[in-house]
Amino acid sequence: MRKMGSAHFSLAEALSIISGRSQLVWYYCMMMLCLIPYSLGAGRGHFYKWEVENLYWSPDGVENVVMGINGRFPGPTIRARAGDIIHVQLTNKLHTEGVVIHWHGIRQKGTPWADGTASISQCPINPGETFNYRFTVDRAGTYFYHGHYGMQRSAGLYGSLIVDVAEGEKEPFHYDGEFDLLLSDWWHESVHRQEVGLSSKNFRWIGEAQSLLINGRGQYQCSLAAELSANHCNLTGSEQWAPYILPVLPNKTYRLRIASTTSLASLNLAIGNHKMLVVEADGNYLQPFETSDLDIYSGETYSVLINTDQDPSQNYWISAGVRGRKPNTTQALTLLNYQPTSASKTPQSPPPITPEWNDYNHSKTFTNKILALDDPRVPRPPKNYTRRILLLNTQNKINGVYTRWAINNISLALPPTPYIGAIKFNLKKAFDQAKPPENFPQDYDVMKPAVNPNTTTGSGVYMFDYNSVVDVILQNANALNPNVSEIHPWHLHGHDFWVLGYGEGKFTPDQEKNFNLKNPPYRNTAVIFPYGWTALRFVADNPGVWAFHCHIEPHLHMGMGVVFAEGVDRIAKIPRQGLTCGLTAKRLMKGKNLG
Ligand SMILES: O=C1O[C@H]([C@@H](O)CO)C(O)=C1O
């Protein structure tokens, strides 16, 4: 039954996900009772056996070390149907560091211990050890997975996770074929060196990426577009860094599933001569809208439809370039290759030009077009909230020497005991018991550097009443240097939220009257623009402990995140596998039951 890659797994395993009590389940299965849930329509199971290891690889033509899975970079694509059960048996083959994998956009209803966030939902998996991720993919959509320990996502630990509609269900749009595009940025400096630079007394910023990658492939030393110059890439197509080409037939509709797992870059994607119809974001359907270029921030996913209605004797560039930071990285390129035209035919038109990096009006116009589809599958927000918290994002110093990011003047320092165990077993020494602040001083000037940039680290938790409606106002501000405020894409684990609105400057309660309660997009990642605010609403209906953080990897490393928790007392038995560190390990050693 078990082999490398994907396979259906046993009914018993399927059941153990549903109940979280594998031994009992085996017993019941022996009694043949396990047939009942299957006949009631439980999803199909997919079993994957993965090994995470460092590999020599050339993502952009320069040999480097990447964090891969089963000898590949990026990791294998998971493909399932809504309602299916995924079981990834993950073995850590790294030599000297732990690892975890987060299933980005999957809400982990009933399986909060499988969220794959080190210090929050589990202990890092030690070298040589194996952890079983079992969870249900409850909704069709475009997702991805990635490392969530230190900066392992930046090291290349990521892959696509695609969920099709359940058998017999239909998408609200038609397409003839599809491609997955996983976008990332790539540094030649090792992630270990980057982490040291960011955490040292003499702060060293990572700088801009050397390359942008599409499905793990970029070109650093040469250009695909520079046909007549010596700099033209000389490729056979079999290189690890040869572009992932999209072969299409004329007069068809294709779905491109686009996910950004970038460490730092905000991107803009465009296809020469082709418009895109945007239909899905973060696993939720959108009111379709047409665009000639698409902004995508780290942690976001989109589906777009394109019609291959252009001259079929030509090929067309697909390009992705940096937005929101002064770019120092060349565009990523690949080809929309009309069949039977040869893929070696260079497009007639040059690659689309990325809008100016600081043309924020362009980004805001795009963002404001993103609205939920009028469809019962996309939930609408409750009209009122139970609790509202304001989160001020600032860049700070600690003791005048370390550079960090802070939320309401606390910079997140993750503790060694996973919160999920610490809260469930009331281990008060495991993290700061003081409630983290819910707002910031009224007179804080978001347009200027902080008067006193000093901050402290903390590990407190925002605890929400189960089923309460929470509003979060993310407030951006000036960074340490004058006239600098950056883009931050915030990602919430365990939930989707409604994006009720965006605004400029400091949020004031009277702006609530402009909130979109009718058809706000339902997402798991939303951006705050420089000097602006973003208002989110979600229902705290998923028992667990959930990270909410800036998806820019170095920013999270520098403390830009908070921890949310709700209904932890309702969590069924947490598998011991994930709790064998910190104070939960001590509890296990004392022989105390973790149930
Ligand atoms: O966190 C960051 O640090 C640098 C800069 O602010 C200090 O060098 C930068 O561009 C960030 O996004």
Image (tube, rainbow, N blue to C red):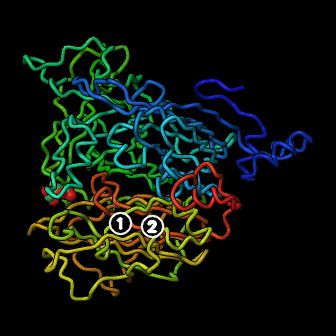
Q: According to the image, label 1 marks what residue?
A: 412
Instruction: Name the residue rendered at 25%, 14% in the picture.
Output: 344
Where is 16 relative to 370, above or below?
above
Q: According to the image, label 2 marks what residue?
A: 563
What is the quadrant of residue 471 in the picture? Answer: bottom left
Q: Nearer the viewer, residue 2 or 76?
A: 2
Which callout, 1 or 2, points to the residue nearer the camera? 1
Q: Which element is circle 2 on?
A: strand
Q: Amino acid at mark 2?
A: Val
Instruction: Name the residue rendered at 40%, 78% in the picture.
Output: 436
Ligand 1 closer than 8 Å to label 2 CB: no
Instruction: Name the residue rendered at 26%, 88% in the picture.
Output: 442
Q: Quadrant of the N terminus?
A: top right
Where is residue 529? Give x, y as percent: 25, 64
- Give residue 76's mark: none
Residue 272 seen in this snapshot: yes
- Disc 1: CA contacts within 10 A as few (<14), some (14-19) or many (>=20): many
Q: Residue furthest front?
A: 590
Answer with left or right where residue 407 lies relative to residue 395: right
**Label 1 close to label 2 by CB (< 8 Å):** yes
Q: Which element is circle 1 on?
A: strand
Where is residue 212? Give x, y as percent: 25, 36
